[in-house]
């Protein structure tokens, strides 16, 4: 199974640039700006992921962050947990 550079480019360009960056601090906008330079590497990465049917170890890792729901969070219920994943995984 293989994925084309065109399929990847379409997906990257459709992505919401307002999403928070991943745990790697790379925003989707970065991928959009340098797409022509990384297209081949991204195709290789995703083709390998599809062939092996698995993610790399670093793609499986996330960082859990608790965001306050109000101005004075005092209890765990006052926070909303989110997991930051690497942008290439998203």
Image: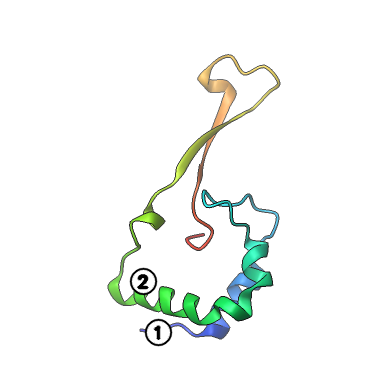
Q: Residue tagged by mark 2?
A: 49
Q: Residue tagged by mark 1?
A: 2
3D distance between C-alphas at marks 1 and 2: 10 Å
User: Which of 65/30 is in front?
Assistant: 30
Q: Are marks 1 and 2 in contact (CB under 8 Å)?
A: no
Q: Where is 46 relative to 72, above or below?
A: below
Residue 83, percent across and down?
49, 43
Q: Left or right: where does residue 72 sit relative to residue 11?
A: right
**Corner quadrant of residue 15:** bottom right
Quadrant housing the N terminus: bottom left
Residue 42, percent across and down?
49, 75
Residue count near mark 1 (Cα–Cα under 10 Å), binned few <14, some 14–19, many ≥20? few
Numbered disc total: 2
Residue 71, percent across and down?
71, 21
Q: Residue at x 62, y 68 (%)?
A: 31
* Element marked by disc 1: loop
Q: Residue at x 52, y 48 (%)?
A: 23
Look at the image and name its color scheme: rainbow
User: Which of 69/49 is in front?
Assistant: 49
Q: Residue at x 44, y 46 (%)?
A: 62
Q: Where is 83 relative to 22, above or below?
A: above
Q: Residue furthest top?
A: 74
Residue 87, percent across and down?
54, 58
Could you tell which of marks 1 and 2 lies nearer the N-terminus?
1
Q: Residue furthest front?
A: 37
Q: Left or right: where does residue 88 sit relative to residue 32?
A: left
Residue count near mark 2 (Cα–Cα under 10 Å), binned few <14, some 14–19, many ≥20? some
User: Which of 48/77 is in front?
Assistant: 48
Q: What numbered label is drawn on residue 65?
A: none
* Element marked by disc 2: helix
């Amino acid at each position: 199974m293989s994925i084309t550079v065109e399929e990847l480019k379409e997906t990257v360009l459709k992505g919401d640039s307002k999403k928070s960056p991943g745990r790697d601090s790379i925003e989707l906008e970065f991928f959009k700006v340098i797409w022509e330079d990384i297209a081949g590497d991204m195709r290789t990465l995703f083709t390998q992921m599809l062939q092996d049917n698995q993610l790399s170890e670093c793609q499986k890792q996330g960082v859990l962050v608790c965001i306050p729901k109000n101005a004075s969070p005092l209890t765990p219920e006052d926070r909303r947990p989110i997991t930051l994943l690497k942008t290439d995984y998203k």
